[in-house]
Image (cartoon, grey):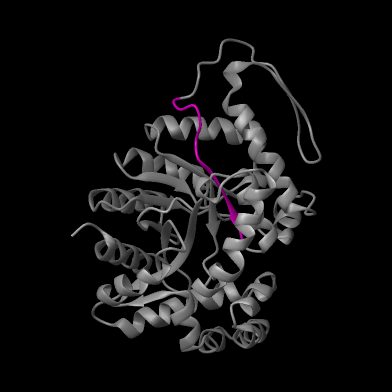
Amino acid sequence: MAGGPLTFGIESQGTSVRAMGELAALADRAGVDAAWAPELYNRSATISVAEMANRTTNCRVGTAIAYGVGRSPLIMAAEARDLDELSDGRLVLGLGNGTKRMIHDWHGLDPEAPAVRMEELVPLLRQLWRLHEGPIDHEGRFYRLKFKPTGEVPPPLRERIPIYTAGVNPRMVETAGRVADGLLGHALFTPTHVEAVVLPALEKGTVKTGRELSEVEVASLVITVVDDADPERARREAAAQIAFYSSAKTYAPLLESCGFAAEGEAIREAFGRGDWEGMVAAVSERMVDGIALAGTGTEVRAAARRYEGLFDHLILYAPSYGIGEERARENAEAVIAAIGEQ
């Protein structure tokens, strides 16, 4: 952990690429530290960040996350070079694997040992970042790369870019401590879970590779809804986003560790029978309070203080599940207004 003051970023899913650029520009004008782009089967984080980089001048722009498994290391490094150039050196490259099912079914790759895969990928990307220094000959478990540039390669804008890796289970969190510049935590994390599980796993990773915990920025997504006119609507929309994530069996151990095993089981049962309303109803008030920041701007700013000393950076994730694009954008704009410089 860097140990400085808690900083804030914004991420919005469910809006268009152009809208994400406009929201990033709004966040930049408001003095928000960073704007982040998500990735899913219908949205490329790197393309979104290109738009966001063009619309901003001061804030960091980052991927939270881009699928490292969905691109070859060579293409990933080339995209990162371009994005860092577009942003004048403001890129944070956030990488994740997704679940084992996503690795296998979506990308058609070996889903075993995702932590080891990431621990091979990040150093290889760093080698590719220094492509101007000479050829690369890599023969690993997951990646094979033999490459010699056909001509002179100019050095990148920066000697090194920050690479963050996503972690949910302790072993993936440990990976960030071993090889990354930062951890991207999951939106279902609670402060208690971070203190009891996440930070010890992160420190275990730094010890493995002889690093200091201060070398790793600790960041996490936090579901955030601000609604000064109707704070109860904010809580309902936060509950819907929590239900969406909790419906995946992959996150059952995380929910159990956070003290929400019963809620998680009820959400998955409702999901199994196609009962959307039942899924949201299964999200307890305690669960909303523990996982999300939801309410008026004043309430959200006050509640965010619980993360001081645990995280270096909060990525305030404006929800989109179960609502339209216009409302998703309203949520993001309200969050920016609440956390921006007054």
Image point 56% across, 72% down: which residue?
A: 193
Q: Residue at x 26, y 66 (%)?
A: 338
Name the side, left or right, on which 127 lies relative to 232: right
**Is there any visible trace of residue 97 in the rendered image?**
no
In the image, residue 233 lies at what x, y percent? 35, 82
301 sits left or right of 256 in the view: left
Magenta residues, start to end:
157-167
Residue 297 percent location from the top left of the image: 27, 72
Q: Is residue 280 left or right of residue 332?
A: right
The relative height of residue 203 versus residue 190 in the rendered view (above or below) is above
Q: Position of residue 172 (x, y in %)?
A: 67, 56
Residue 246 visible here: yes
Whether residue 158 appears in magenta in the rendering, the answer is yes
> Considering only vertical position in the picture, is 203 above or below 274?
above
Q: Foreground residue, 228 or 34?
A: 34
* Number of marks in picture: 0
Query: In the rendering, at what x and y percent does residue 31 appear?
Result: 25, 51
Q: Quadrant of the C terminus?
A: bottom left
Q: Residue furthest left?
A: 342
| 304 relative to 50, above or below | below
Closer to the camera in the image, 110 or 315? 315
Up-down: is 29 above or below 198? above
Residue occupying image coordinates x 81% and y 40%: 141
Q: Is residue 225 magenta?
A: no
